[in-house]
Image (cartoon, rainbow, N blue to C red):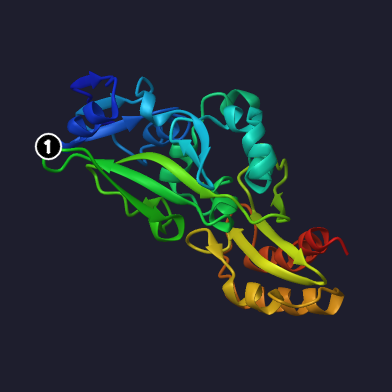
Amino acid sequence: MSEIERYTAPRSLDEAAGILSAGNVTVLAGGTDLMPQTQAGRMHFQPVLMNVRRVPELRGIAEENGVVRIGALVTITELLESALVRERLNLFWQACDHFASDQIRNVATVGGNLCNASPAGDTLVPLLALEARVVLAAKPNGTLQTRRVPLGMFLIGPGHTCRAPAELLAAVEVPLPPAGFAGEFYKHGTRPGLDIAAISIAAGARMDGAVLRDVRIAFGAVAPTVIRAPRAEAALEGRKPDAALLEAAVQVALEEIHPISDVRASDWYRRELIHNMLKRVLANVCKL
């Protein structure tokens, strides 16, 4: 474990970005991923440890102009207790209800879960289905700047994102789903609330008369990152749902995933789970 030479706790986003710009900084928020990973030797502390929990710009949940902004420091418990998240982003809220234990939820942050970039990350799957984007802040030339990156482009590999070392994830922005949109989150594990997902699914759509519109399907733990299933979505879009259509869409989805075999499940078992559970999730979304 590397030795920490300096501890700092900035009180503004501008100050935090300035510290990051100097380099060699480890960012600490909830610490529910950072601390176990450093203790296991998978990560090493940089000389500067920066605790961002006093940065007010990283907090809060608010809706403006059809977009819900969720600060990076918002905890899973705060998301569960938010009426805005439950009512307008219910697909995301469901995932938070399957996230770890109460003790972990009280300190784990949405920003930390995104930056950890696990292909099995619970919040990543619904956020990808909801077409979220992250807000990254940096101070490259003495002036605070931000950029927005779609979540699908932010996540580039297991444990890896496109965030530069001098950037801080400030928030995630989620466009409100269209009126009538209904979604469902499913996570499979021995103890679904506590275990890392063997697979997870986030699916949603709205009924336009008798046909499906705005179809979204996302998976976790079946590829190097969480993924959308665009071909399966296209197979359902604009079609009247029935059992045969759902089975056909599931078969397309099975061609879009690339699961591995590991300690949680085999490739074969993950495919069986996707086949059976995606069909059930889609049937619930379509109210079949």
Does residue 198 appear in this view? yes
Name the one closer to the observer, 212 or 160. 212
**Vertical position of residue 220 compared to residue 18: above or below:** below
Picture quadrant of residue 271: bottom right
Name the one closer to the observer, 148 or 93. 148
Q: Residue at the left extreme?
A: 141
Name the one closer to the observer, 231 or 36. 231
Q: Residue at x 11, y 42 (%)?
A: 141
Decide if residue 97 is on the left or right side of residue 65. Answer: right
Q: Residue at the front extreme?
A: 65
Q: Report helix, strand or loop for mark 1.
A: loop
Picture quadrant of residue 129: bottom right
- Residue bearing mark 1: 142
Picture quadrant of residue 40: top left
Q: Residue 4, how many percent across, how many down?
A: 23, 24
Q: Amino acid at mark 1?
A: Gly
